[in-house]
Image: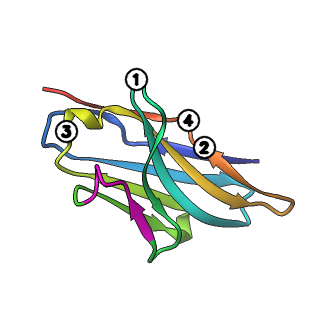
Amino acid sequence: QVQLVESGGGLVQPGGSLRLSCAAVGSTFSVYAMGWYRQAPGKQRELVAISASSVSTTYSDSVKGRFTISRDNAKNTVYLQMNSLKPEDTAVYYCKSTIATITTVGDYWGQGTQVTVSS
């Protein structure tokens, strides 16, 4: 069984920083793309950033230049460094990864972590 375990959310003032972590644990054989999505109240879930590999990353326009996605392949972990946070970044942040086990390949989601940007 595979799980994505997230940590690092919280309350921060505008202009502040937070770092999210997401670790793939369990019977992983290969971990492919890893990314972050977010969902604000009353809105659809949207892509924040994705790491297809250690050198291939994509960001949404709303976070480009402020957020950085990185990964540690040895630990099957992806990070999201969030700087210059704005109130509109407030959302539940979800980690998503494409993972192969011995028997199957599929997309997995983390449980979500709340990020609140407020003074």
Q: Which residue does the image show at 31% across and 54% down from the upper left?
A: 61
Going by the numbered disc 1, the residue's amino acid type is: Pro
Marks 2 and 4 sit apart, C-alpha to C-alpha, by 7 Å
What mark, if any, has residue 83 been given in the picture? Answer: none
Q: Secondary structure at mark 3?
A: loop
Tell me which segment is drawn in magenta: 57-64
Q: Where does label 3 land, which residue?
A: 86
Q: Which residue does the image show at 41% across and 64% down from the upper left?
A: 58
Going by the numbered disc 3, the residue's amino acid type is: Lys
Q: Where does label 1 land, which residue?
A: 41
Going by the numbered disc 2, the residue's amino acid type is: Trp
State yes or no: discs 2 and 4 in contact (Cβ < 8 Å): yes
Name the spot of residue 99 as percent of width and height, x first. Answer: 68, 59
Disc 3 residue crowd, few under 14, some 14–19, many 20+, Cα 10 Å? some
Q: Nearer the viewer, residue 82 or 56?
A: 56
The answer to which image quadrant residue 80 occupies is bottom left
Q: Which residue does the image show at 65% across and 47% down from the upper left?
A: 108
